[in-house]
Image (cartoon, helix red, strand yellow):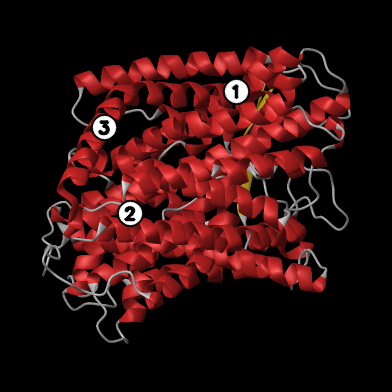
């Protein structure tokens, strides 16, 4: 097969049909990612499934080629990744500043932050993508799929994506009908201590665990053990509760109000440690990029096609131009907050703009490096959001001192708004360099791909606001004020947004109890020491501290399902160790896992539409409470049976023609 399009080739690349197809795929993956992120705080890297779908569609057109397929996946992946803005933006609903997601505010945050994420990473492309040995796991995988498709197998893997999607959507449908239970929970009481074990019957989580791998999976399991094996039992034993409160309710309260903040501290320390580790290579990368840009100016058009980035002066102009809409958006938003009155403090708006522009570049460099090191799916974007929240809120709280409730609420809202722009910068930076690595491997033209990235951002900015509003109106958020007709059992957790909103309010009001956060930070430091020792004394053993923090913070059922997916992928990897078709079969597993996530997530979006249309919280329920004991058994057995089938599907002998 042809590994790379040569520099001398002249093929259709940045085409109208490619941009349109990428935009259409964007709608699908944006919906899927939003639902998954709001439900459990996890998103997916969409480059691989987008590349597969692109090849399956463009096979029916004339003159389709690997470079055009690469543009399609670039548009789709950048827009789908932008959905990570839900890590902070729902906080404005949670604190009562918004009652939904206004289109222009939400689209503005996504567009401004996303465009900065693109422009800030262009100068880093040569240093991080070309001149280093960073693995860029998802970018390399997407390039391999594009190569296989270019070799004649243009439907490569599409059947596996569809199979995974149908299996996950079918199981989710059975859950909505109430034929299958959607989770299992058991409670354990030892003396005066109470704890629980839970598993979510979610194939989206199985797919997410499959993609993140065994190292992250086991780290998540360690987080679960710290939370539910140590902290919750200890707190239920030592913290008294009212007689009318059950032991189970007390355990849940301890986890929600105390233990989760251990995860906050651990995540924050992990994010800071990562940034410190990246500081030196980041500075080297910037220096190398500036040297390359000077060479480009001196050489002009003599540069090979595959080395031509967007002109540096254009990058600077676009970046600086973002100051105007950013300032306007922040000013209009601040004016809408009653606590600021008619004239919000200009110093706060100016500080927010400066913070976004300067800290945003640091975030872009760090996230780009993290994407190359561990992949976009594993990068700690939520940790970046937490660090940004602390860096904004702590000095503002010190500056403002003791303020009244109205002004305090307005400041909290402005901080969350600002952090949301930073999160958009971070998530796009995280994805863009992954896409540019794919382009570098297949021989794409960098500037054309960078234009496609901006197109993807703008498409995503238009799709995200109505989709977020649809999901909120249908399900509601677990930690928000109760809404008329809202079913708490169906409410979306929005875990990171809940955390950021709680953290911001606590810092500004000087009411936050730092005990659990500091203890979590101490746990994070200890785990970092363990990770450093493992890195220096073993070949492959690592302990991703961020994953441990997320294992503490996320619900138990979420963590266990992710661990199960990671274990299945590990078992398949070992089973295929000596097989000649190992790489092709592992790619099949990746595509199946992507399909699982897409299928369940899209079913969730479809169900949200039905809920809004009918006004019923469980419009598909056909079986009543009396069937629940049977549904528990059926759900568990069916879940295991389908998981085993998918594992065996990945284990089946495979050639390049079927991936």
Q: Which residue is mark 3?
A: 285
Task: Name the image quarter holding the N terminus.
Answer: bottom left
Precedes in sequence: disc 2 or disc 3: 3
Circles 1, 3 touching at the beta carbon (< 8 Å): no
Number of the front mark, 2 or 3: 3
Residue visible at 64% across and 39% down?
327
Marks 1 and 3, how far apart in space? 27 Å
Marks 2 and 3, how far apart in space? 18 Å
Q: Which residue is mark 2?
A: 435
Name the foreground residue: 23 vs 529.
23
SS label for mark 2? helix
Question: Left or right: where does residue 439 sit relative to residue 99?
Answer: left
Q: Number of labelled discs?
A: 3
Is residue 374 something that shows in the picture? Answer: yes
- Give neighbour class at mark 1: few <14, some 14-19, many 20+ (Cα, 10 Å): some
Question: Is 76 drawn above or below residue 318 in the view shown?
Answer: below
Precedes in sequence: disc 2 or disc 1: 1
Q: Which residue is mark 1?
A: 390
Question: Left or right: where does residue 608 sit relative to residue 403?
Answer: left
Question: Is 498 drawn above or below residue 561 in the view shown?
Answer: above
SS label for mark 1? helix
Residue 337 placement: quadrant: top right
Number of the front mark, 1 or 3: 3
């Amino acid at each position: 097969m042809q590994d790379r399009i040569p520099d001398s080739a002249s093929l259709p690349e940045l085409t109208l049909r490619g941009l349109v197809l990428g935009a259409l795929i964007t709608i699908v993956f944006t919906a899927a990612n939003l639902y998954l992120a709001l439900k459990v705080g996890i998103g997916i890297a969409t480059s691989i499934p987008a590349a597969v779908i692109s090849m399956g569609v463009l096979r029916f057109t004339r003159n389709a080629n690997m470079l055009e397929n690469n543009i399609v996946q670039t548009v789709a992946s950048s827009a789908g990744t932008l959905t990570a803005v839900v890590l902070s933006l729902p906080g404005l609903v949670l604190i009562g500043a918004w009652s939904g997601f206004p289109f222009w505010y939400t689209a503005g945050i996504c567009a401004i932050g996303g465009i900065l994420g693109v422009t800030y990473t262009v100068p880093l492309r040569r240093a991080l993508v070309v001149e280093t040995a960073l693995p860029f796991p998802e970018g390399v995988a997407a390039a391999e799929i594009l190569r296989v498709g270019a070799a004649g197998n243009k439907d490569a893997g599409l059947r596996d994506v569809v199979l995974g999607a149908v299996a996950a959507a079918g199981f989710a449908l059975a859950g909505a009908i109430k034929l299958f239970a959607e989770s299992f929970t058991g409670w354990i009481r030892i003396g005066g201590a109470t704890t629980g074990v839970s598993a979510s019957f979610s194939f989206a989580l199985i797919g997410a665990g499959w993609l993140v791998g065994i190292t992250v999976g086991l780290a998540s399991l360690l987080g679960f053990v710290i939370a539910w094996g140590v902290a919750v039992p200890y707190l239920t034993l030592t913290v008294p509760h009212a007689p009318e409160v059950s032991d189970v309710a007390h355990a849940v309260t301890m986890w929600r109000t105390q233990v989760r903040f251990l995860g906050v501290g651990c995540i924050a320390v992990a994010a800071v440690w990562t940034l410190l580790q990246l500081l030196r290579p980041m500075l080297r990368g910037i220096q190398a990029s500036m040297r390359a840009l000077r060479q480009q100016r001196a050489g002009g058009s003599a540069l090979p096609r595959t080395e031509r980035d967007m002109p540096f002066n254009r990058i600077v102009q676009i970046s600086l131009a973002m100051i105007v809409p950013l300032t306007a958006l922040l000013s209009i938003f601040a004016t809408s907050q009653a606590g600021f009155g008619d004239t919000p403090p200009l110093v706060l708006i100016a500080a927010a703009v400066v913070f976004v522009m300067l800290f945003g570049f640091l975030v872009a460099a760090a996230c780009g490096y993290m994407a190359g090191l561990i992949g976009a799916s594993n990068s700690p974007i939520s940790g970046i959001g937490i660090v940004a929240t602390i860096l904004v809120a702590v000095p503002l709280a010190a500056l403002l001192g003791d303020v009244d409730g109205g002004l305090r609420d307005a400041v909290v809202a402005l901080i969350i708004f600002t952090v949301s722009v930073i999160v958009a910068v971070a998530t796009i930076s995280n994805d863009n360099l992954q896409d540019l690595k794919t382009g570098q491997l297949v021989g794409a033209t960098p500037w054309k791909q960078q234009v496609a990235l901006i197109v993807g951002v703008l498409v995503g900015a238009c799709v995200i606001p109505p989709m977020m509003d649809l999901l909120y109106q249908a399900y509601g958020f677990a930690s928000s004020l109760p809404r008329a007709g809202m079913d708490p059992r169906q409410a979306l957790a929005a875990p990171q947004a809940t955390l950021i909103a709680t953290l911001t309010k606590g810092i500004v009001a000087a009411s936050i109890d730092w005990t659990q956060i500091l203890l979590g930070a101490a746990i994070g430091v200890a785990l970092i020491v363990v990770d450093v020792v493992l890195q220096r004394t073993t070949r492959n053993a690592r302990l991703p501290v961020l994953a441990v923090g997320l294992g503490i913070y996320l619900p138990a059922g979420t963590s266990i399902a992710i661990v199960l997916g990671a274990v299945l992928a590990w078992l398949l990897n070992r089973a295929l160790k000596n097989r000649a078709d190992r790489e092709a079969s592992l790619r099949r597993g990746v595509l199946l896992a992507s399909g699982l996530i897409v299928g369940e997530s899209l079913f969730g979006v479809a169900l949200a539409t039905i809920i809004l249309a009918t006004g019923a919280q469980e419009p598909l329920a056909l079986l009543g409470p009396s069937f629940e004991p049977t549904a528990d058994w059926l759900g568990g057995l069916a879940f295991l049976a389908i998981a085993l089938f998918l594992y065996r599907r990945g284990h089946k002998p495979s050639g390049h023609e079927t991936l």
